[in-house]
Amino acid sequence: MPGARFLGTGLAVPEQVVTNDDLSRLMDTTDEWIRTRTGIRERRWVREGETNAGLAHAATLRALESAGLEPGRLDAIVYATSTPDHFAPGGGVYLQRMLGTGAIPSIDIRNQCSGFVYALAVADAFIRGGLYRYVLVVGAEVQSTALDVSTRGRNTAVIFADGAGAAVLGPGDGGRGILGYDLHGDGTYAEKLWVDAPGSMYHPRMSAGQIEAGRHFLEMDGKEVFRHAVTRMPESVRAVLAANGYTTADLALLVAHQANLRIAEMMQKALDLRDDQVYNNIERYGNTTAATIPMALDECARAGRLTPGDLVALTAFGSGFLWGSALLRW
Ligand code: UT7
């Protein structure tokens, strides 16, 4: 059975541009430090009123338009986010309500930076198995409201950002479609990149004391995450290529999770890829967690960087730790 293929993509980001200089007015940091360590120049952060599901909706409308489909043609939604608008329900139903699709099923994937790759695997399984024909896959995040913008939180606040990417998937055809996956998780490192509260293990789920202590902020051991990311992603890309009888020389494009430009550069070197085989946009958007891959794919598709039949790999690493790759014929 052929895997699902991309029929259309879309991207949406908040209006507000936050530059490195803007951040240096909030915390002890500099444009030079941020650019040198991460490659980021600016990112988008929501203003009050802009929401995770709202960004997902805007990205979805663009994806549907490029696929030439009306919302009513969608059979299911797979929504990757680690930052839903509410603790429950997840983002999928809010998006479904905004789209006015009718009572189609939706499923939220809470796999953080690897969320889109996992969401793709779920949507692909639905389509491959014949359960659904057109499945919307979304990666949407609002990280800015979980960032400590004081000097205490500067190692995460300068990296993470908001945005959404969407893709409409349909049945593969003529050799075009998803070829395979390489997916992993290792909870040994769960607390290396996490948000502690609110959590159902606490009574109540979040206390004034926890807020005081900043337990609701995204917390990361940056060095440890970096060390694993630069090993796991190249390893996973090689694995998915080898499992399908290819090498890195066969790749037209690698779209990797945009965590840090230095990670992307080390990965490019480790995989011996030319500049035209990789795509990075972290400079303009920062790290939007589950949204980075669909946002980058949309930019590549619209810029003519993807031609039908191209061999494309997607790879991600992040909180969990969870990581993995997908390989496809565009
Ligand atoms: O998307 C999911 C996966 N996430 C990632 O892959 C992120 C991986 N990690 C990273 O990208 C890097 O670890 C960071 C860019 C986040 C941090 O870089 P680092 O070189 O690992 O810095 P560090 O946290 O070890 O801190 C080194 C120094 C510290 O100062 P001292 O203790 O040496 O005096 C920090 O306080 O840099 C300081 N520092 C900063 N200085 C200015 C940390 N953040 C900043 C900042 N501005 N924003």
Image (cartoon, rainbow, N blue to C red):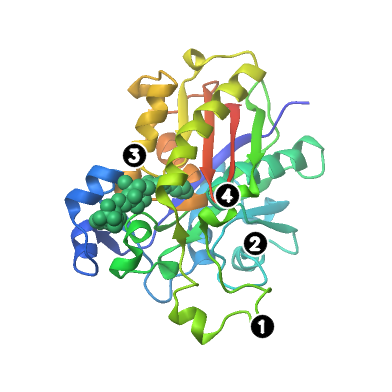
Q: Earlier in the sequence, mark 1 or mark 2?
A: 2
The residue tagged 2 is 92
Q: CA separation, marks 3 and 1? A: 40 Å
Location of the N terminus by quadrant is: top right
Where residue 317 appears, x then y in whole percent? 52, 42
Q: CA separation, marks 1 and 2? A: 28 Å
Question: Label 3 amino acid?
Answer: Leu
Q: Nearer the viewer, residue 205 or 283?
A: 205
Check residue 239 in the rendering and tell me which mark sits there, or answer none.
Answer: none
Q: CA separation, marks 1 and 4? A: 25 Å
Q: CA separation, marks 4 and 2? A: 28 Å
Q: Residue at x 55, y 57 (%)?
A: 191
Check residue 261 in the rendering and tell me which mark sits there, or answer none.
Answer: 3
Badge 3 residue CB within 8 Å of ligand 1: no
Where residue 213 appears, x then y in whole percent? 45, 77
Q: Residue at x 56, y 49 (%)?
A: 64
The residue tagged 1 is 203
Q: Secondary structure at mark 4?
A: helix
In the image, residue 76 above or below residue 87: above
In the picture, measured across the screen, residue 57 lies left or right of residue 34, that is: right
Of discs 4 and 2, which sits in the foreground? 4
Q: CA separation, marks 2 and 3? A: 30 Å
